[in-house]
Amino acid sequence: MNSKVRVLLHGVVIIVITVALFWRTGGHQFIDFDDPDYVTANPPVATGITASNILWAFTATHSSNWHPLTWISLMADAQLYGLEPGGYHLTNVIIHAFSAALLLLLLHRLTRSIWRSSFVAALFALHPLHVESVAWVAERKDLLSAFFFFLTLYLYAEYSAKEKKSLYLLTLFSYICGLMSKPMLVTVPVIMLLADVWPLHRLEFPELKQQRAAGTVRLMWRMKEKLPFLALSFLSALITIYAQHMGRAMNRISFTLGMENAALAYARYLAKMLWPRNLAIFYPLPVAIPLWQPLCSLLGVALISWLTIRAVRQKPYLMVGWFWYLVMLAPVIGLIPVGEQAIADRYTYLPLTGIFIIIAWGVPDLLKKLPCRRIILTIFAVGWLALLAFMTRRQLGYWRDSVTLFNHAVGLAPDSHTLHTMMGNALVHKGDAGAAIKEYEKALSLKPDYGKARNNLALLHLNLGNALSDKGDLDAAIGQYRQSLSLAPNLSGTHNNLGITLAKRGDMNAAIKEFQDALALDPNSADARNNLELALSPEGGH
């Protein structure tokens, strides 16, 4: 059979298996965490593709991110499906499946090894750690960036072989699209240099001294051709830092804890890759980490790095795959803490491809002297992929709706105030106010100064008071807001919500003061300004 036909056939098989495995997400709901910010409560996205919405996509730093292509892709779904979640989920599945097939094409183009390339693509397609990126609509950015990442490397391989300016510009354009999908691709220039070592063999590590000068010249030239990519990476990083600063996404934790968590994360991700049990949407950041754990992780990283560098002439795929993993994970490892999580499954979506490459090329090399080698490798590959597919199918079941998802996560981390708050939010949207109050109260029993739980509990009491005209619920809401402000007095939104609650109870003078305090903290708050104007109007005073 012609090799191109064989590759095409392998790609089709991977697409079919991936779509079949993930198809059930078409019956899933939106998740009450990030999905409202990205779609359901985001008018520029929910109203579909218009000129003004596209302009917004390129100029907004909504949800602490700048990724216009992600916004536009979600707008396209809104245009097609409205706010029916099934269509969004199936778009995610299709992008994931085609990205896996593109990874197969890329590795085959680079190595001409169809079975090893197919195995890496299958691991990428079926691994349970990738469920979060596919089953969560808000992670469309992961899927799009992966597609453009693999496309960028494919075009780069073509450019490396033919050195045509048009191919170089196409590679650069694909990279721009990837950065506009998710800025995690800032490390791509380094991955290109790794590909120059293996499998492109554009960089070598000569043993003889007289050859090292020529090797240095080649390295400088290869770095020079990456300069436009590095400039784009730097620009994307600056925009991302600005967006996260504007969205107040950066988490304030101690420097020591952040470094310890980052060091330990490299080992935790590898452990979850090998045995993906107890996966959850949120892994709480611990209060403290025993020092021996990050130290052992760092020692392991350093030792493996040294060994792979030592073996670069004989087995270059070891160094390339290992540093692929280290480098691609670096932007999300936690050196700059964002959010309240210690680690996240979605962060492994692209980095683990490096480890998959090590396994696909390393295990056959390890067993090359064994009799019946092909049979053993086939049993290993088919057995592991079947196990991963089974675990992925089970993990997908937890993502069918918010209550199921957060209930699973709370069961794995019952002492997490953040997860109890998320569970409370999911129950509010389900309409179970009584259960939601219990979750918020549980969160506050674990962390009394947790502002999100206290504010959400106060808002729930306010809504109950509005619905039932219950003065007791309004008083409870006021008490929660005042307690929240005693712990964090500089929250404009809390002052505004307290003002609304006081106005509902008829205490207009106190409400006016809260609206004024909200505007003093955030002069651009349209809600606080409108509420103040209403409270000061003759109708508002009655």
Image (tube, helix red, strand yellow):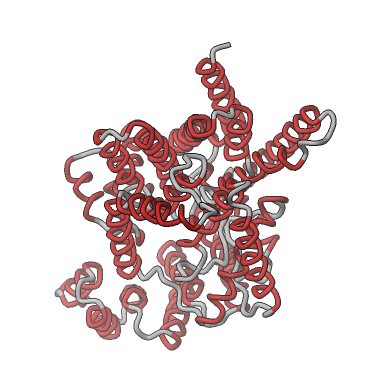
- Image coords of residue 142 (percent x, y): 45, 47
Q: How many marks?
A: 0
Q: Nearer the viewer, residue 77 or 107?
A: 107
Residue in the picture at 29% in, 85% down: 510
Q: Nearer the viewer, residue 270 or 474?
A: 270
Question: Above or below — where is 540 with respect to 76?
Answer: below
Outermost right residue: 371
> Which quarter of the rendered picture does the C terminus lie within?
bottom left
- Image coords of residue 468 (percent x, y): 45, 64
Which image quarter: residue 505? bottom left
Q: Is residue 229 left or right of residue 102?
A: left
Which image quarter: residue 417? bottom right
Outermost top residue: 1
> Which quarter of the rendered picture does the N terminus lie within?
top right
The answer, for residue 37, to whether it is visible in the render is no
Q: Is residue 115 left or right of residue 387?
A: left
Question: Above or below — where is 521 with respect to 98?
Answer: below
The answer, for residue 250, to whether it is visible in the render is yes
Q: Nearer the viewer, residue 506 or 128?
A: 128
- Image coords of residue 515 (percent x, y): 26, 79
Q: Is residue 381 left or right of residue 353?
A: right
Residue in the picture at 56% in, 79% down: 257
Residue in the picture at 51% in, 82% down: 254
Residue in the picture at 37% in, 35% down: 155
